[in-house]
Amino acid sequence: MNQEQFEKLLKENGIELSEKQIQQFNRYYEVLVEWNEKMNLTAITDRKEVYLKHFYDSITASFYVDFTKPLSICDVGAGAGFPSIPLKICFPHLEVSIVDSLNKRITFLNHLAKELELDNVHFHHDRAETFGQNPAFRQSYDLVTARAVARLTVLSELCLPLVKTGGRFVAMKAANAADELTQAKRAIKTLGGGKMKVDSFSLPIEQSERSIIVVEKSVSTPKKYPRKPGTPNKSPL
């Protein structure tokens, strides 16, 4: 996906990028590739591939969830900033927090935010399990996102405790999302989740399958969740 295709497809979905936003994406690509030589941020470094599989793919969440309103977002395990930083560029009013367990990635994100002149972004070096038990952050976000981090049974325990009641958890998945949701329904209900929906579509050009799972938080998460670091992965609900 070249830059023209990127801009055109976003425009068709109601997002018209300004010159500043176009420059921010260009600079994001440059910084990503530059830092990727020093640390493992992504296996994808070709410009067209990054624009399609990282930038555009991240923004597809906004085709199914309304990001035009003021929202506080927490992105769990964002790695090099996906999906929250591309969404922040497109919707500058968002307040974005990223939690990641690797301090090297947090260092990269702090540098990236300065380079892109982003405000209202916060980066936390922590495990999602301990972050979700921290009273300063627990059940405080309008929306919590995660992209390709873990299976939904595990991901729900890492993300739903951070969502405020009435807020939403948005999981970005590739194929088999409907099966994952079926397997995770019990865990989601246990963690306070209510109404759920899946939207599936094909990524343009390469036609690979993608899904956006949206879970509404209907009641508070029981205090014992999330469990200790590593436990959700070893013993999913």
Image (cartoon, grey):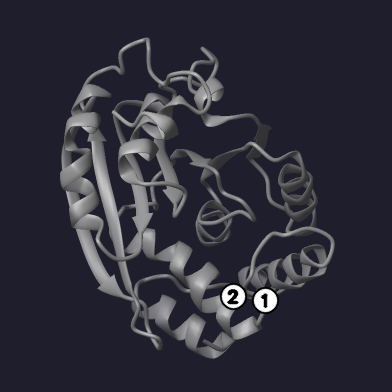
Secondary structure type for disc 1? loop
Q: Position of residue 166 (x, y in %)?
A: 26, 28
Give the vertical position of 198 relative to 8 (above or below).
above
Q: Amino acid at mark 2?
A: Val
Do labels 1 and 2 touch, CB within 8 Å?
A: yes
Q: Which mark is residue 45?
A: 1
Q: Secondary structure at mark 2?
A: helix
Q: Judge whether residue 158 can be spotted in this image.
A: no
Q: Position of residue 127 (x, y in %)?
A: 59, 30
Residue 118 in percent (x, y) is at: 69, 51
Residue 78 position in % (x across, y down): 56, 48
Is 50 placed left or right of 116 in the picture? left
Q: Where 144 falls versus 53 (above or below)?
A: above
Is 118 located above or below residue 42 in the figure? above
**First reached walking from the N terminus: tag 1 or tag 2:** 1
Q: In this image, 96 relative to 209: left or right?
A: right
Q: Is residue 122 above or below residue 203?
A: above
Q: Is residue 30 left or right of residue 236?
A: right
Foreground residue, 223 or 119? 223
The residue beneath circle 2 is 50
Give the residue at x 44% y 85%: 8
Mark 1: amino acid = Thr
The residue at the point 29 percent across, 62 percent down is: 211
Q: Nearer the viewer, residue 65 or 223?
A: 223
Density class for disc 2 (Cα within 10 Å; few <14, some 14-19, many ≥20) is many
Q: Residues within 10 Å of mark 1 (few under 14, many from 20)?
A: some
Q: Residue at x 67, y 37 (%)?
A: 123
Task: Report the side of 102 relative to 5 (left or right).
Answer: right
Task: Tell which of 184 and 28 is nearer to you.
Answer: 184
The quarter of the rendered structure image containing the C terminus is top left
